[in-house]
């Protein structure tokens, strides 16, 4: 049986386990956070530090379960300490939830962890699901139909050697499991970052530019209670974008606890960035492009425009 323990940053970073249960706070909300994929090292646990910051900023203690998929199988195969396939893992999580007896359950994750947050959130009847850039399917046929080839080898592996249980279309799972008690938050970038082939002439090369995360979000939004949080200046790495623009803590507070935190101050544009603006203007880059890049790195629209205007003035 898994034992709760007082987690700290070092333990979370160095443990060999695939699931960690933080100390139990009777009656407090529970957040189950799922880690994202890593092909070169063992996947890390995710959101622990952010949840600690949320506790400090809100004054609300949280129960925490941290889960990762060391096999990078989108949480369909063995999760050491929980189960060998989805239904076993879901049952083990239900048992943990019963022991903790929280006031509410939130599932949380980005990318691969976002898929798990939606899948297990529905299976556990969570009150909140917060998913950053999740896929909506792991089905090879649908992947080819939508030109979703980013993680096609994972889908092919699951199809060739399917585990004892699996959920490969989250839209279908929403139809079967979504209830009025579950609120889903889908957070995603909408900046075009994938070239879709020309359907009329596939051999002609790239057609329209698309953002596949937005497509997945729209598929999931058709079912249940779903709030979309699109960010036009971000691609798939929307969590990093929100960290850079100092919006991640406020969004987590809103989605998990329904709280509005005071906005964090935006970063200042330092000398290195000012020199970068001046150099790129000298090379002929459009000011609008430089403003967009500065905003992508977390600077406000007003300060980005001011930096470009100041560089232009100095160049005269």
Image: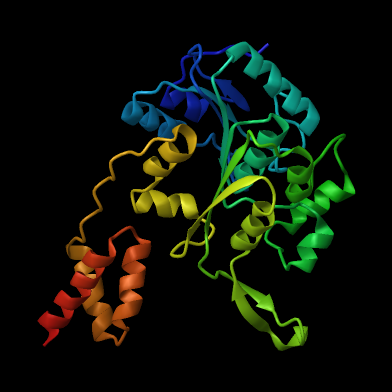
Q: Is residue 283 left or right of residue 82?
A: left
Where residue 53 appears, as percent x and y from the top left, is: 36, 32
How many numbered circles are shown?
0
Where residue 209 appears, as percent x and y from the top left, is: 59, 76
Where residue 103 appears, as percent x and y from the top left, is: 54, 20
Q: Is residue 94 left or right of residue 258?
A: right
Seen in the picture, residue 79 relative to 191 is either above or below; the reply is above
On the rendered image, what quadrant is the C terminus found in? bottom left
Q: Quadrant of residue 219?
A: bottom right
Most foreground residue, 2 or 95: 95
Seen in the picture, residue 72 relative to 137 is either above or below; the reply is above
Query: What residue is drawn where x is 38% and y is 26%?
Result: 55
Q: Quadrant of residue 121?
A: top right
Q: Is residue 95 left or right of residue 53?
A: right
Most foreground residue, 159 or 123: 123
Q: Quadrant of residue 180?
A: top right
On the rendered image, what quadrant is the N terminus found in? top right
């Amino acid at each position: 049986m898994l034992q709760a323990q007082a987690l700290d940053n070092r333990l979370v970073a160095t443990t060999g386990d695939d699931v960690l249960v933080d100390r139990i706070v009777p009656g407090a909300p529970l957040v189950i956070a799922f880690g994202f994929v890593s092909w070169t090292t063992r996947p890390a646990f995710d959101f622990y530090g952010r949840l600690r910051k949320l506790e400090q900023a809100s004054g609300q203690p949280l129960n925490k379960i941290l889960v990762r998929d060391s096999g990078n199988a989108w949480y369909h195969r063995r999760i050491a300490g929980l189960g060998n396939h989805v239904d076993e893992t879901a049952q083990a999580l239900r048992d943990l939830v019963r022991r903790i007896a929280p006031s509410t359950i939130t599932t949380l994750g980005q990318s691969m962890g976002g898929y798990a947050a939606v899948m297990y959130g529905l299976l556990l009847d969570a009150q909140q699901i917060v998913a950053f850039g999740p896929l909506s399917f792991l089905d090879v046929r649908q992947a080819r139909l939508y030109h979703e080839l980013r993680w096609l080898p994972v889908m092919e592996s699951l199809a060739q050697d399917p585990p004892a249980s699996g959920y490969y279309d989250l839209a279908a799972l929403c139809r079967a499991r979504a209830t009025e008690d579950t609120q889903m938050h889908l957070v995603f970038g909408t900046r075009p970052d994938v070239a879709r082939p020309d359907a009329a002439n596939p051999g002609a090369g790239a057609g329209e530019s698309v953002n596949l995360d937005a497509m997945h979000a729209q598929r999931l939004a058709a079912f249940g209670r779903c709030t979309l949080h699109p960010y036009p200046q971000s691609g798939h790495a929307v969590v990093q974008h929100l960290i850079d623009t100092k919006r991640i803590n406020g969004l987590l507070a809103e989605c998990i606890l329904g709280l509005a935190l005071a906005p964090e101050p935006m970063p200042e544009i330092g000398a290195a960035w000012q020199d970068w603006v001046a150099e790129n203007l000298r090379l002929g880059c459009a000011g609008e492009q430089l403003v967009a890049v500065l905003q992508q790195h977390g600077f406000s629209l007003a300060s980005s425009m001011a930096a470009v205007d100041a560089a232009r003035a100095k160049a005269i």
